[in-house]
Amino acid sequence: MRLTRMTDYALRLLMHVARRPERLCTIAEIAQAYGISEAHLMKVTHQLALRGWIETVRGKGGGMRLAHLPQQINLGAVVRGMEPDFALVECFAGGNQCTLTGDCRLTGLLQGALHSFMAHLDGFTLADLVPGAPAGEVVLMPALRLPKEART
């Protein structure tokens, strides 16, 4: 499974803005920080604002800020909101032409994997991605952390 660039950029944008709650952030600064096209970020910003995760302020001195506290922005909800679909294989989508349909156990296995993936993301908020988590650790599950030296 691979998330779209739109979702990747949305998560990066949210992390950037969450780290700077004291001010408005601009598309230009985020584009420069991550080496992303401003045009792509404009689309991402629009989608995030439509879904209510960020607020935008127009005009000179404008920018964006989170519409909620980081601990109120669920990562599973963000991914679901930004991804166009979760059709991991043909049989997940409409117009399925797979000759194995009805006689294939792969569909159930992949649906279970997708469900587990999303359930895992549902256990985290934007607050888990910004400062506050112990330095040098990667969050695997809410109660399980991997030391830095074990991540290589």
Image (cartoon, rainbow, N blue to C red):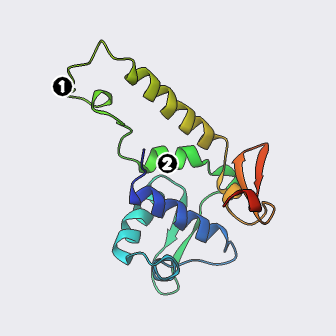
Gap in Å between the C-alphas at discs 1 and 2? 27 Å
Q: Residue at x 48, y 87 (%)?
A: 60
**Looking at the image, do the residues carrying marks 1 and 2 touch, with CB atoms under 8 Å apart?**
no
Q: Amino acid at mark 1?
A: Gln
**126 and 142: which one is in front?**
142
Number of callouts in the render?
Answer: 2
Secondary-structure class at tag 1: loop
- Residue 8 on image: x %, y %: 47, 59
Q: Amino acid at mark 2?
A: Val
- Of pointers 1 and 2, the one earlier in the residue sequence: 2
Secondary-structure class at tag 2: helix
- Residue 21 on image: x %, y %: 68, 71
**36 and 13: which one is in front?**
36
- Label 1 packing within 10 angstroms: few (<14), some (14-19), many (20+): few
* Discs 1/2, front: 1
Image quadrant occupied by the C terminus: bottom right
Q: Which residue is mark 1?
A: 97
- Above or below, 19 relative to 81: below
On the question of residue 107 being in view, the answer is: yes
The quarter of the picture where residue 97 lies is: top left
- Above or below, 118 relative to 100: below
Outermost top residue: 103
Dot label at residue 109 = none
Q: Is residue 26 left or right of residue 126?
A: left
- Residue 3 on image: x %, y %: 43, 51
On the question of residue 69 being in view, the answer is: no
- Residue 112 on image: x %, y %: 50, 26
The quarter of the picture where residue 70 lies is: bottom right
Q: Residue at x 51, y 80 (%)?
A: 62
- Label 2 packing within 10 angstroms: few (<14), some (14-19), many (20+): many
Q: Residue at x 20, y 20 (%)?
A: 99
Q: Which residue is mark 2?
A: 79
